[in-house]
Image: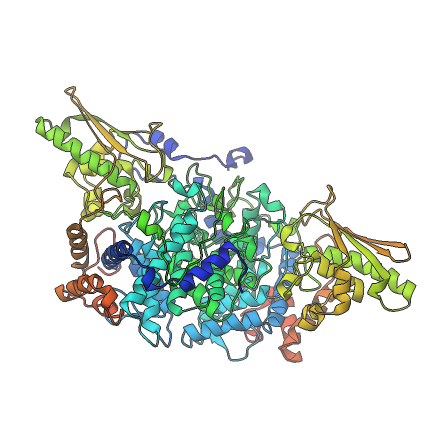
């Protein structure tokens, strides 16, 4: 058994290999599989066993599955989802394989179903968020459900197999993000779901498709060529497509790998002069995963829980909304019920610096979901932000606009653009001269203060009931609760539309 | 009205450019590029990677399908036809190369022909020429937003970065989208851009061109349905700027209907390859061929060679001392040098497993030393290749190539370009198909229906066999 010290990653260069094998001309150029980060990931994907999932990991991942289903179901009501679905139905013939969320009888080719379902998951920015920052579930679950639908009736995966594949997809994302310190901060260049989400989908899909470890590595490498989209498209209608494409293309990568397509065997490794996955980061230090055969893998989800949103907006909005809600409470105490804008002289927000969520006057629902100012003022007026806060009517409220015009934003030096340590302060100065303050360090739903199971189920019910019958809503809750004991995931597949 | 932004100016230009803006030089050059692209694409339909992708893509069907090159009767949904045909074009690294570096045509032509197959009113040859030129132009312009783009790439593979933008622009043009929609197509396409260099020199590299073609077409289709992205996608550092360390976008000048337009292609021609390998290999092969002649002229033998020095620019992904696969061999200074020393040239066949495994070749490979002189810059516009061979008898023979035949500074003659096409196409098509394409491209601006090309592209001769590079599923 190798000691721990020896198991740490040794960077391997082509020159090293050449020196080792100078005399033998017909030795294969590449390093032995055991020695690369890339192959260690392939080995992990194939080698994880169901009994490696601890009770905590099972519980947390089932919560993620339920939440992801719910936000996707409510997301199937959106315009952007409709657009994606129409596109697929126009461009491709009927292919009754994989179910589309919330649309009874509508099925598409597996990758296309993964695509539109992924779009649904992120359509309202209501889906889960992790640390380092990404939206992990929406890229993975749609691909797995699509594959499950693809498999023959008597060969469907069990609930446990689904959960293992799901956790593989999440774990790979988490591990990849830890290769770079850049990933810890709110992103500026590449939208993380498009960087690690595609890889997670490829990993999870490769697992559910039972690819061998070499194929799993190639799936990741093929997926790397399908990763990466700019932050500038966040806060636009295109953003949901980022998750849709992550799900779709990761699945495609796995399908291509299953047909023998090969790509770089060093894609995750740091090779000087030739960028692989490192292309997406300024600093990059990869580490191999331990072999599941030698050591019980420890899932990141065990140490780092997921954040779930209470309303459909960028995670940063939740701090500001909670802080503003506290001020709202005090205000209505003073005024006896409502918050008349003319009483407010000035609103100061102390938030971390992040250009794409600093929008004084958002013009669309997408922009509003990415606006400190909008979410603060909405919570100030209403005491909370909800799904309805982003409707056209709500966006154009005169009261809201009156407040928006009074907002100033400051970026205190100690308020870093990082979901693990940021805070928000809302300071409202009234015409009377009174100053009301609210501060939020950890909003309810953050991983430090997780939603209770009750709250999570309530969110799910609110979301799912917009498209599903009460029977299916409760049915899904029951099925997910019991997922690891399900012999066959058909009950899950049958109730998502 | 679109705001005055770089992105807006691109949207406006894509929409406003007309055939009248095409100059003779641009028309001549784009026709050459199209012919070359079709030829390498046809040859590429015999590769294993094409077969794999075709098999994968055949799970998809549509009401309106587009033709797969070199496969009579085989149709796919347009995006997948664009995909597999794009893969074919880049499958052997035989397609055109530009400066700043990218392979511009493989991302554009497959998308346009696939789209053309599905349009209710078939586009004319002139419309195809114009859309193609627009797709090339957009790529050229955006590459000039960064100095980094001037050098041989290290992070992102350029066809995956700019190719998808070119495909989006070209297909938006052919679809007749509005300026706002053209800009939206670019924004949506940007979210599909980018692939790491590590996958160059692997079987996945051809997918970079295939996906660029496919996803650019998809971006246009989504834009035509009303999908929007960031209206300033080209303006922002957090937009298209993410792919570059330095990024300074510039607006395109207003396109006046009757005025003159300056195309990038007019100032900067493309390079056309004479054998299927990375462009850098062409310098080294020419130098090595010259050294071989000198060696033989002085009655020396290759078996007397004791040391081979190859002086090339530093570029990790094409520095491969002992390539194991055909893909690696196409990206190996050492391999191409030694092949040219042995045979006097590098050809399609040089990358077959038989040729790759020659003991005489491996013997030479073991004697190669690579040097990176300070004055040899990793840029296709400035690099050179020098080969020096020393013999056990004390002989020393050297040659240097500054500009290989086929480079933009020394373009292939028309005759040689057509010969290359005919040689490639004859692996797949009948003489009628071959001549049909040559003739149609030659008179493209007068062709009523450009989809005639698609018919020729499926006029296969009998008994076409896959190229024997490695075990093929069809054998």
Q: Residue furthest top?
A: B394
Residue farthest to the front, as pictured: B258
* Image coords of residue B141 (percent x, y): 41, 51
Q: Is residue B122 visible?
A: yes
- Residue B260 lies in quadrant: bottom left
Above or below, B410 against B55 in this view is above
Q: Quadrant of the N terminus of chain B?
A: bottom right
Which residue occupies 18% across, 61% down?
B438
Identify the residue at horizontal 53%, vertical 39% (top origin): A285
- Whether residue A385 sits left or right of residue B104 in the image: it is right
Instruction: Give x and y (percent) for residue A61.
Output: 62, 59
Q: Please provide percent x and percent y for residue A331.
A: 87, 62
Relative to A101, is B69 above or below?
A: above
Location of residue A95 by image quarter:
bottom left
Horizontal side, residue B104 vs residue B249: left or right: left
In the rendered image, which quarter contains the C terminus of chain B?
Answer: bottom left
Between A20 and B334, the one lying in front of the other is: B334
Way the structure is coloured: rainbow
The residue at 20%/34% (across/down) is B288
Q: Position of residue B47 (x, y in %)?
A: 26, 56
């Amino acid at each position: 058994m190798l000691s721990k010290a020896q198991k740490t990653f040794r960077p391997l260069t082509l020159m090293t290999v050449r020196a080792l094998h100078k005399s033998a001309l017909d030795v294969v150029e590449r390093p032995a599989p055991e020695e690369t980060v890339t192959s260690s990931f392939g080995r992990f994907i194939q080698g994880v066993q169901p009994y490696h999932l601890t009770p905590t990991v099972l519980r947390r991942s089932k919560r993620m599955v339920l939440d992801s289903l719910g936000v996707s179901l409510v997301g199937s009501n959106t315009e952007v989802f409709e657009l994606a679905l129409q596109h697929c139905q126009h461009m491709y013939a009927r292919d009754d394989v994989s179910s589309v969320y919330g649309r009874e009888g509508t099925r598409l080719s597996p990758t296309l179903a993964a695509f539109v379902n992924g779009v649904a998951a992120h359509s309202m920015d209501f889906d889960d968020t992790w640390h380092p920052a990404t939206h992990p579930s929406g890229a993975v679950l749609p691909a797995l459900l699509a594959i499950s639908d693809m498999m023959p009736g008597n060969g469907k995966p069990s609930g446990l197999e689904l959960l293992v594949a799901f956790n593989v997809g999440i774990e790979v994302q988490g591990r990849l993000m830890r290769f770079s310190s850049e990933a810890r901060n709110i992103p500026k260049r590449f939208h993380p779901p498009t960087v690690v989400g595609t890889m997670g989908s490829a990993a999870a899909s490769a697992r559910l498709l039972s690819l061998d470890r070499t194929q799993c590595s190639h799936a990741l490498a093929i997926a790397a060529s399908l990763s990466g989209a700019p932050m500038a498209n966040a806060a636009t209608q295109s953003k949901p497509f980022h998750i849709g494409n992550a799900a779709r293309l990761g699945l495609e990568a796995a399908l291509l790998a299953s047909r023998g397509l090969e790509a770089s065997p060093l894609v995750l490794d740091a090779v000087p002069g030739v960028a692989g996955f490192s292309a997406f980061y300024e600093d990059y230090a990869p580490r191999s995963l331990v072999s599941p055969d030698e050591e019980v893998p420890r899932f990141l989800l065990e140490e780092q829980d997921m954040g779930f949103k209470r309303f459909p907006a960028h995670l940063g909005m939740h701090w500001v909304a909670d802080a503003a809600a506290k001020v709202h409470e005090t205000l209505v105490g003073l005024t006896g019920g409502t918050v008349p804008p003319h009483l407010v002289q000035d609103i100061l927000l102390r938030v971390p610096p992040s250009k794409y969520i600093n929008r004084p006057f958002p013009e669309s629902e997408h922009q509003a979901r990415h606006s400190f100012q909008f979410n603060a003022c909405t919570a100030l007026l209403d005491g909370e932000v909800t799904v309805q806060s982003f409707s056209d009517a709500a966006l154009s409220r005169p009261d809201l606009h009156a407040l928006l015009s009074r907002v100033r934003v400051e970026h205190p030096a100690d308020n870093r653009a990082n979901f693990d340590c940021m805070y928000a302060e809302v300071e409202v100065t009234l015409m009377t001269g009174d100053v009301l303050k609210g501060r939020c360090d950890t909003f309810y739903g953050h991983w430090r203060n997780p939603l209770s199971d009750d709250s999570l189920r309530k969110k799910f019910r609110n979301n799912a009931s917009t498209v599903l019958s009460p029977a299916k809503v409760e049915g899904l809750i029951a099925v997910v609760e019991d997922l690891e004991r399900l012999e066959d995931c058909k009950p899950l597949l049958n109730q998502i539309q | 009205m679109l705001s005055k932004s770089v992105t807006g100016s691109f949207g406006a230009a894509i929409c406003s450019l007309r055939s009248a803006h095409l100059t003779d030089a641009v028309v001549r050059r784009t026709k050459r590029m199209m012919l070359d692209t079709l030829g390498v694409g046809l040859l590429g339909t015999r590769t294993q990677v094409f077969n794999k992708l075709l098999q994968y893509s055949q799970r998809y069907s549509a009401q309106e399908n587009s033709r797969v090159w070199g496969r009579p009767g085989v149709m796919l949904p347009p995006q997948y036809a664009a995909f597999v045909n794009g893969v074919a074009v880049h499958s052997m690294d035989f397609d055109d190369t530009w400066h700043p570096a990218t392979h511009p045509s493989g991302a554009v032509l497959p998308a346009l022909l696939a789209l053309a197959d599905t349009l209710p009113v078939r586009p004319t040859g002139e419309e195809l020429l114009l859309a193609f030129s627009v797709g090339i132009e957009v790529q050229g312009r955006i590459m000039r937003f960064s100095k980094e783009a001037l050098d041989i790439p290290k992070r992102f593979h350029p066809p995956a970065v700019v190719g998808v933008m070119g495909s989006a622009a070209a297909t938006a043009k052919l679809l007749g989208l509005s300026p706002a929609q053209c800009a939206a197509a670019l924004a949506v396409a940007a979210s599909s851009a980018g692939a790491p260099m590590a996958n160059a020199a692997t079987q996945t590299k051809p997918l970079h061109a295939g996906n660029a073609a496919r996803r650019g077409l998809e971006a246009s289709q989504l834009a035509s349905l009303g999908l929007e992205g960031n209206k300033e996608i080209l303006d922002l550092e957090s937009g298209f700027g993410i792919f570059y360390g330095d990024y300074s976008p510039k607006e395109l000048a207003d396109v006046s209907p009757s005025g003159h337009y300056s195309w990038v292609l007019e100032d900067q021609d493309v390079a056309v390859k004479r054998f299927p390998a990375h462009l850098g290999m062409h310098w080294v092969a020419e130098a090595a061929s010259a050294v071989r002649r000198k060696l033989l002229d002085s009655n020396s033998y290759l078996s007397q060679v004791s040391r081979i020095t190859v002086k090339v620019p530093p570029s990790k992904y094409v520095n491969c001392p002992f390539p194991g696969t055909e893909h690696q061999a196409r990206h190996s200074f050492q391999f191409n040098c030694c092949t040219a020393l042995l045979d006097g040239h590098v050809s399609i066949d040089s990358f077959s497993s038989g040729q790759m495994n020659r003991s005489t070749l491996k013997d030479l490979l073991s004697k190669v030393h690579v040097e990176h002189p300070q004055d040899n810059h990793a840029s296709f516009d400035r690099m050179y290749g020098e080969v020096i061979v020393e013999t056990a008898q004390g002989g020393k023979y050297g040659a240097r190539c500054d500009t290989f035949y086929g480079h933009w500074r020394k373009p292939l003659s028309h005759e040689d370009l057509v010969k290359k096409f005919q040689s490639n196409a004859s692996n797949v098509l009948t003489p009628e198909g071959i001549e049909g394409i040559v003739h149609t491209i030659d008179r493209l601006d007068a062709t009523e229906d450009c989809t005639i090309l698609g018919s020729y592209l499926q006029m296969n001769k009998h008994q076409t066999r896959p190229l024997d590079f490695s075990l093929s599923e069809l054998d």
